[in-house]
Image: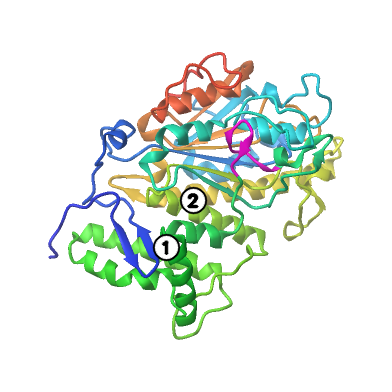
Amino acid sequence: MPMTTTLSRRTLLRGLGTAIALPWLEAMAPTTALAQSIVSADRQAPRRLGIVYVPNGIHMPAWSPSQVGTAFDLPELLQSLEPFRDYLTVLSGLTCDKARANGDGPGDHARAMAAFLTCMQPRKTNGADFRVGMSMDQLAAQRIGQATRLASLELGIERGQFSGDCDSGYSCVYSANLSWRTPTTPMPKEVNPKSVFERLFGAGDPNESQKSKALRLQQRKSILDLALEDAQDLKTKLGSSDQRKLEEYLSSIRDVEKRLDPGNQPPAAIGALSLPDKPPQALPEHIKLMCDLAVLAWQTDSTRIFTFALANEGSNRSYRFLGVNEGHHELSHHGQDKDKQAKIAKINHFHMQQLTYLVERLHAVKEGNDSLLDSAMLLYGSCIGDGNRHNHDELPILLLGKGGGQIQPGRHLRFKRETPLANLYLSLLDRLGVRVDRFGDSNGRLEGLS
């Protein structure tokens, strides 16, 4: 029986130019007053916030449950979440008024992305004088981000432009950025899994990191290989349960690292990888890699806040692997055409499958008797309801997770018309330990979540 030891939550596995944070182990406990302030007393795990955004609205007839409360049937688009019904809250009736024109004319897609997390009216400009507001994730990161190595993590699938006109006189910066550190400073999303992986597991010194990367590539070494000696030493000091958890964690890192470059592995060394400079061409694998990296970021407590845009707002990507050759945005203007609506539903279903994969992964990572999903508040939705109508009320919004016991899921909640989406954000911020009186166009807190 190995000798057990007490570990700091900030313990790292180190190798040449490598620093791998550890997952939550039984040998760990919160060590700072800040950590204690946002840890649920009975679980000793931090609460976490994740936002997943989909563009161009949803096929709402296949989305909205007809019943409210706990006895509701999951409609077609939500059925993949049936195994996680006890973690699911469907929120109907929420409105993002600041995505509406409000006198500014067309440009619903740009406004939708920019206003979703800020709940502020974007200034209509296609120049460098863009302005919207601080997003709720960045408000949270500002208050609690110092408890983790990364204050927040911004992920995406499609790159965005920071200049030019992308939507009826609105700058492209609006259509491509969910997260805003200040009203004039967007937080650009990272679309390359390699860069996210290196950010999570590379060394802190950029100069040392470049040298170590060159040496690693020359020796065909993986990031994990460089830290295995430290890992083996640590295992001798852990109990059997923590040993198993550490093995599972290291295996998940190895799996992600292998998938980042599946075609460039010497047969004698599974971990010897040269990570590609471009994201995967296959969209499903690209999204799954980003989901796995988000899970690892939470699992290691590298950050407690992430945003993930599955596409830019107004994206006209085609989904040929689903048999959908037309562009997503083009199809969203379906004009009640049944064939186009069916194709939109296919795209929506695909996105829901990706969300389900993320939820499955979060549920599989255990922290004591609970999982990452128990501590999470994972928001999924769009700032457009029906893509054909370009409406910004009756938004498709899901909340998954229990927020460390602060959310009572397993329900469909319907709110009165024109209830601000910002009211939800105030309530989620409260549960992160971030108390503010107002946010965006809020007029109160969203009641009934717990």
Residue 145 lies in the magenta stretch? no
Circle 1 packing at 10 Å, graded few (<14), some (14-19), many (20+), is some
Mark 1, secondary structure of its residue: helix
> Cα distance, mark 1 to mark 2?
12 Å
**Residue drawn 71% across the image and 28% down it:** 122
What SS does tag 2 mark? Answer: helix
Q: Is residue 62 above or below residue 9?
A: above
Q: In the picture, which quadrant includes the N terminus?
A: bottom left
- What x and y, as percent, mark residue 160? 70, 48
Whether the magenta-drawn stretch holds residue 179 is answered as yes
Q: Between residues 446 and 334, which one lies in front from this camera angle?
A: 446
- Residue 136: x and y, percent? 53, 31
- Is residue 299 visible from the viewing direction of this image? yes
Residue 291 in the image: above or below residue 340: below
Q: Nearer the viewer, mark 1 or mark 2?
A: 2
Q: Disc 1 residue type?
A: Ser
What is the span of residues highlighted in magenta in the rendered image?
Answer: 176-187
- Quick check: 142 left or right of 67? left
- Disc 2 residue type (three-letter): Ala
Q: Residue at x 24, y 41 (%)?
A: 31
Q: Which residue is mark 2?
A: 294
Which of disc 2 and disc 1 is earlier in sequence? 1
Q: Mark on residue 252? A: 1
